[in-house]
Image (cartoon, rainbow, N blue to C red):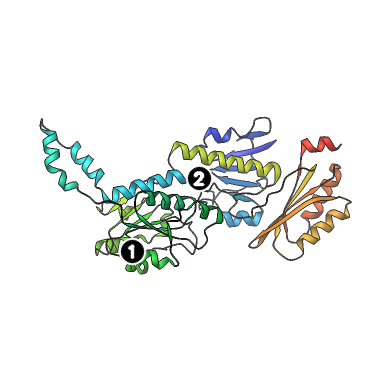
Amino acid sequence: MYQIKTFNAIAPEGMARFEAENYAIDQGENPDGIILRSQKLHDYAFPESVLGVARAGAGTNNIPVEALTEKGIVVFNTPGANANAVKELVVATLLLSVRPILQGANWVQSLTGGNLEEVAEANKKQFAGHELEGKRLGVIGLGSIGAMVANDAYRLGMEVMGYDPYVSVDTAWTISRRVKRAQQIEDIFTTCDFITIHVPLTDATRNLIGEKEIAMMKPTTRVFNFARGEIVDTDAILKAIENEELGGFTTDFADEKLLHNPKILVLPHLGASTEEAEINCAKMAARTLKRFLETGVIKRSVNFPTVEMSFQSPYRITIIHNNVPNMVGQISTEVAKLGINIENMVNRGRGDYAYTLIDVSETDETKMVRVKRHLAGKENVVRVRTIKNAEVFNEWI
């Protein structure tokens, strides 16, 4: 039976995927897997039993990914599961940025007297705004969210320009052919009326928008940050708005310095805060973690390569190892020494680490214990598992 530890409240629709006969939830001190949302785990003492960590969300800044990679712990996220929720909020704030809807609604609430309709009609001009149609939107990052924002903005009548040198083939197929491609990010900064950012936080994207980038923009340009707070230099934004060098800023990350400025809209991290998004993220996180524990398949990992292979043998050996030459040969030789026949095998690398799956036609559990011990003792091997395919195993014996 697998042990699962949860942090935060995970939607029950997701947790239901861990059937009671095979999984125990929050019942032990040595979990095989962890599933969480926003809990910070940088100070958490991970038990040696932990094989995988799944975040019900896209960002993994609350997880010590590098340290877990060194321990051979696979970290998963749920890209795209909350994309529609974030996209809808971005579109909503685009509309709010050109139409003073909130200001008008609040003003009406303050009115008193019997001639309210006449007063409202006589004073509505103070809340006149602009239209998005015909304006140019720049989308930096064309992943699941950015692609959806680009498509919907085009449907609103906007000219849309996207920049993403790493866009995946799958995502590229979903983007409207009418979304123009920026050859370099400067094209976004110099030509767009609105700029929205949808990239992960890395050393390369930290302060992606700063004084230099703002200086390229029109003084009327409005910037939207629904990615991560640190991607935009807050001080540079404030300085530009004070000097009337930027039209406005909208962010989903609360910062006291940004409050009480009429040209800045600060939201309390509402991007993925819908019931549907929480359910979708929980389902995807649970499904991904469950599949990894039961079959060793890695998909949607932020620290190890995607490795998928149909599991049709009695046993599977999984090896996390350093991505160095001749590891596959050494592993195969070690398995063969014990007289174990390899039926299928796949190896993938990612950076300094690699992952190998080996399916074997072996039913002798003693041999499997020995091969695990031998492989685990080899240089450059980080972690070894043997997974029994109970259904197939019973057919073989």
The x, y position of residue 267, in whole percent, is: 35, 47
Residue 296 x, y percent position in the rendering: 70, 46
Whether residue 239 sits left or right of residue 384 in the image: it is: left
Q: Type of residue at label 1?
A: Ala
| Tag 2 residue | 39
Quadrant where the N terminus sits is: top right
Spatial separation of the CA atoms under disc 2 and disc 1 = 30 Å
Mark 2 or mark 1, which has the lower sequence index? Answer: 2
- Foreground mark, 2 or 1, reads 1
Task: Identify the residue at horizontal 32%, vertical 65% (top origin).
Answer: 217
The answer to whether the residues at label 2 and label 1 have Cβ atoms under 8 Å apart is no
Please give the name of the residue rendered at 80% of the width and 41% of the height, measured from the top-left corner.
Answer: 314
Instruction: Decide: few, some or many residues near mark 2? Use Cα within 10 Å; few <14, some 14-19, many ≥20.
Output: few
Q: Crowdedness of circle 1 by 10 Å Cα count: few (<14), some, many (20+)?
A: some
Quarter placement of the C terminus: top right
Q: Secondary structure at mark 2?
A: loop
Residue 121 in view = yes
Extreme front residue here? 177
Decide if residue 377 is on the left or right side of residue 189.
Answer: right
Q: Is residue 122 left or right of residue 340?
A: left
Q: Which residue is mark 1?
A: 236
Type of amino acid under label 2: Gln
Nearest the viewer among 124 and 370 is 124
Residue located 81% across and 57% down the image: 332
Residue 198 drawn above or below residue 204: above
Judging depth in this view, the residue of 88 and 78 nearest the camera is: 88
